[in-house]
Image (cartoon, rainbow, N blue to C red):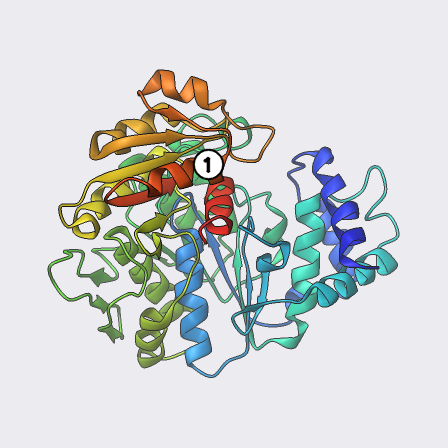
Amino acid sequence: MDFAELKQLLFARGNFGVKLGLERMREACALLGNPERGAPVLHVAGTNGKGSTCAFAEASLRAAGLRTGLYTSPHLNHFCERIRIAGEPISEERACELLEEVRRRIPWALGDPGLTFFEIVTLMAFLAFREVDVAVVEVGLGGRLDATNVVVPRACAISALGLEHTKYLGPTLAHIAAEKAGIFKAGIPAVTADQPREAAEVLQRCAEEMRVRLWRPGRDYRFESREDEAFWYGGPAWNVRAQPALAGHHQRANAALACALLEAGGLCEARDAEEGLRSTRWPARLEQFGNVYVDGAHNPHAARAIAQALPPLLRGRPLHLVFGALEDKDAAAMLDALAPLARSIHYCSPDSPRAVPPERLARLRPGQVHRNAAAALAAARRETGVVLCCGSLYLAGETRGARD
């Protein structure tokens, strides 16, 4: 199998849609010899900040001298970004070997019905992680019925929650919190970011029902959230002082959540977390290329966090926004947060069949319409000031690819 065949086989599975449930995954894992039970796992769910939390945690574990696995989704520019070993994406050749193993040992995996795209890639990650000391695994959608939830983690985390995927997870924050809490395992510690009261109450109740010790900010751990003060984290036994490498005020909460997860998991020391926070690299999180910032923010909560992070980055310079969104996202609310800060807005469609036409976006807030992300970025860069590209992870990937 070559990589072109891998893409053809795997991406065709996207037509099978979302199939929540763990029965298929448990059967498939058993046929593979249960690779998900190998290395210790840190499991992370949430709406916003879960990728950054995973990145902070993985970098800290690597700083401890451990060989790490990291599983995240979606990818930005290349499929292999989803599965990382020791901080680096697996090779195309290794990806082909992993898919071949899945196909050989689970004859029905690529059939109809078979496994979904996400289920197969999750199995590939579990197989790849047979060669690591520890793995950090990000939930794909929800938690309770997500394909990753076959793991029994050393500790788990819930990042900031907001309304998302309501078709699958339910219409309220309480419903969504209950689904996220589905990653809790009896007797295994869990940590949470600060949550809206409705979500926090559900998480606490689920933790008590599962006999889970739930670490909450302000009660079980603390951190310095003020950007004009040096960052610190204080847990039951840890004291961490290090400036997080990822830009933005909101990353302090993610860094603190990662520290709490690491302390609860007991897989490294506070000094490793300090080095990890300083050295973390994570694409499309206010990632800077010259005067261009690229961020994967694609919901109102994330857009408001970016808006709060912008003033110190702009330093009085004008902002030019490159924006595109998908149909199932609240583009109007995102623009409510970001458009007032922008001198000009450049709309485009991310490369997805679910993209909102840029002409429709321009009816929400006045702006220029462009044929694609590259054209929108080029137009924004001709302006004087700072360019921000956000609204969709697809758009983030495209603008990263078009930045040179």
Label 1 environment density (alpha carbons within 10 Å; few <14, some 14–19, many ≥20): some
Nearer to the camera, 328 or 6: 6
Does residue 216 show up?
no
Query: Can the viewer see residue 221 in this picture?
Result: yes
Q: Residue at x 45, y 39 (%)?
A: 178
Residue located 58% across and 57% down the image: 82
Instruction: Choose between 158 and 227: the one closer to the eye.
Output: 227
Q: Position of residue 93 (x, y in %)?
A: 74, 66
Dot 1 falls on a residue whose secondary structure is: helix
Residue shown at 51% from the left, 70% from the top:
87
**Which residue position is annotated with label 1?**
375
In the rendered image, the vertical position of residue 169 relative to residue 241, given as above or below: above
Asked whether, in this view, residue 25 is left or right of residue 103, the answer is: left
Instruction: Identify the amino acid type marked 1.
Output: Ala
Indicate left or right for 55 with 310 as reference: right
Q: How many marks?
A: 1
Residue 130 placement, left or right of 276: right
Above or below, 20 against 1 in this view is above
Up/down of 70 relative to 306, above or below = below
